[in-house]
Image (tube, rainbow, N blue to C red):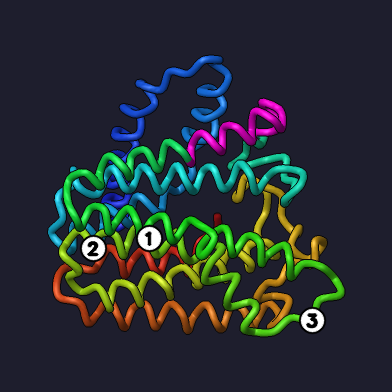
Amino acid sequence: MNVYHLRYEQYLAEFNGYLLKYVDNLHTKPEVLGESMRYSLLNGGKRIRPVLALACAEVLGVERSEILPYALALEMIHTYSLIHDDLPAMDNDDFRRGKPSNHKAFGEANAILAGDGLLNEAYAICFQESMKGEKYAVAAKYLNECAGVYGMIAGQSADMYFSERERAVTEDDLAYIYEHKTGKLLLAPIAIASILANHKNYVEFERFGKLLGVLFQVTDDILDVTGNFDALGKNVGKDEGKNKLTCIRLYGLEGAKLRADLYAKDCQAILEGIDGDTSFLRDLTDYVLNRKN
């Protein structure tokens, strides 16, 4: 195992330990609510957002105890968005990370409520952290903005809107979806780490977060064409069938790969200009560029 993978596993283990403490104290009535929340929350995944939070916090000198609550809230929000995204009214996916989607395991109504529960729990954590002082409240507000109607939800709405076949689409429309649907929740852990460090290197980290979010979505679009179920844990080839506005649709597969290379180079250039050990973040950028799942 190389240094990058070793550090990733360390960050992952640290977050998963913190997550399990929350799950152990999750008691609901009826029990099916908690069961369905746990089902998706504990269904593996790369946990790239919490890992980014911990890695950026380390570069900036932020204590683990300060960043972990936000990392947990962020992962809850991400998980709720996946539960709702898989619903028949949205992307209608039967599988997530190789297992039946939440609505396939628990039914549509319970899946909706599980997503609602995770979102509300995330904000309960943010409210609790906000009581510590101004910068913690600013971090919570930032997460709210990234997740809300001016962030991820706006991107989800635009994604469906521009999938209607009669709609004319532009590069600006694609950029809006990328920035909001995926980009905001990948920017959040990076920017929040800087906020908790009293905005140290904020401009550089914000720019890096925005570019990394776009890179992640471009590679996601590429994998929908080149990937397979065993690696991704979900069905592939659905973007074209649903007329999704993607990088592939506008630029073709080779054009998408070229743009991914350019975004990765821009990310690396920003990281090279930041004081401190950014080697893990540079390796993570390479991983996102070349990922298979």
Name the residue type under label 1. Answer: Ala
Q: Is residue 195 left or right of residue 28?
A: left
Element type where label 2 sits in the image: helix
Q: Furthest residue to the right?
A: 166
22 relative to 148, above or below = above
Magenta stretch: dominant secondary structure = helix
Q: Which mark is residue 195?
A: 2
Q: Earlier in the sequence, mark 2 or mark 1?
A: 1
Q: Which residue type carries mark 3? A: Ala
> Mark 2 belongs to which amino acid?
Ile
Residues drawn in magenta: 102-119
Position of the C terminus, as image quadrant, is bottom right
Task: Please give the residue where the numbered disc 1 appears in the rendered image.
Answer: 188
Q: Is residue 251 above or below residue 9?
A: below
Which residue corresponds to mark 3? 168
Q: Position of residue 170 (x, y in %)?
A: 69, 84
Closer to the camera, 187 or 150? 150
Query: In the rendered structure, does residue 112 fall within the stretch colored magenta?
Result: yes
